[in-house]
Image (cartoon, grey):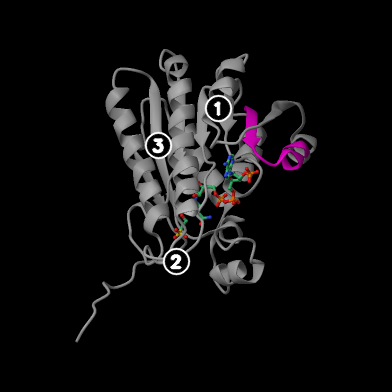
Amino acid sequence: TDTMNGRLALVTGATSGIGKATAERLVSLGAEVIGTGRRLERLEALKDELGERFRYARLDMTDVDAVKTFVGDLSRTPDILVNNAGLALGLSGADEASLEDWDRMIDTNIRGLVHITRALLPKMKPMERSDIINISSVAGSYPYPGGNAYGATKAFVTQFSLNLRADLIGSKVRVTSVEPGLTETEFSEVRFAGDKEKAAKVYENTEHLTGEDIARVICDVLALPAHININRVEVMPVCQAFGAFNIARG
Ligand code: NDP
Ligand code: 8X3
């Protein structure tokens, strides 16, 4: 049913995975959606699929001038912002990892997210109802080998979300940090520089989450009565849990 009628959502990184599934679900619930990403042909294909409720713009989140221009050019301010665009690059130890990869994760996951949020907030704050959903990760709470800069960018996203809540007290803006665990998308393909075989192994023989599962969680959070704010949602598939501490002996 059309529970999102009249709402306008901006979903960054709508060309794949969680963002694409979220755009699809929001449109199916009656919202209008603006989807962004770098791959224009993917956005065009999504437009063909979703029709008139979907609009799109090519936007590279690392280009903060373009982010500012994009927000300035919006004819209507979205009342839902889904900060989803993001990536992990590599799984090397911190002494070997590529600094270029670290920079790109920081520029996308942190800097792009912060800039688009800062550009939209003054217009979202006075609204009768608005929502910011930031896609963080379990990697922001739990360290793992090779998680180094990626996990740290997601810790930033979670803490930034909570700090937004602190600043927005008294307004009607809700903010939620959504922290998924093992979710099969193009995430691992990107992390392993296009190595599909290595990426597939991450999800092999698991009943992993899908982009659609996270889209459902996002839309369920959005559908709660306006006086309820879910600060954080940590989501794992049942097949995933925590490991033991690692102790070097001898
Ligand atoms: P995908 O690789 O399938 O999707 C990532 C999306 O981010 C794409 O639409 C991509 O669009 C976009 N993106 C990446 N870099 C940029 C950029 N510079 N500018 C604009 N858009 C960009 O992975 P997921 O769907 O899994 O990832 C979505 C979010 O979920 C990310 O923030 C990720 O960190 C997070 N996450 C993923 C988990 C998982 O296990 N899959 C678990 C926890 C969190 P394009 O390439 O067209 O620009
Ligand atoms: C993605 C989940 O565990 O691969 O954020 O970092 S993980």
The outermost residue toward the right is 48
User: How crowded is the residue under tag 2: few (<14 C-alpha within 10 Å), some, or many (20+)?
Assistant: few
In the rendered image of this protein, does residue 39 appear above or below residue 102? above
Which amino acid type corresponds to the residue marked 3 in the rendered image? Thr
Rendered image quadrant of residue 57? top right
Q: Nearer the viewer, residue 164 or 73?
A: 73
Q: Nearer the viewer, mark 3 or mark 2?
A: 2
Q: Residue 67, labelled with which disc? A: 1
Quarter of the image where the N terminus is located: top right
Label 3 to label 2: alpha-carbon separation: 30 Å
Rendered image quadrant of residue 15? top right
The answer to whether the beta carbon of the residue marked 1 is less than 8 Å from any atom of ligand 1 is no
Q: Residue 176, labelled with which disc? A: 3
Q: What is the span of residues highlighted in magenta in the rendered image? A: 29-44
User: Does residue 163 belong to the magenta stretch?
Assistant: no
User: How crowded is the residue under tag 1: few (<14 C-alpha within 10 Å), some, or many (20+)?
Assistant: many
For the point 61% across and 56% down, which residue is it?
A: 186
Residue 107, percent from left and from top: 47, 41
Q: Which residue is mark 2?
A: 92
Circles 1 and 3: CB atoms closer than 8 Å: no
Q: Nearer the viewer, residue 68 or 234?
A: 68
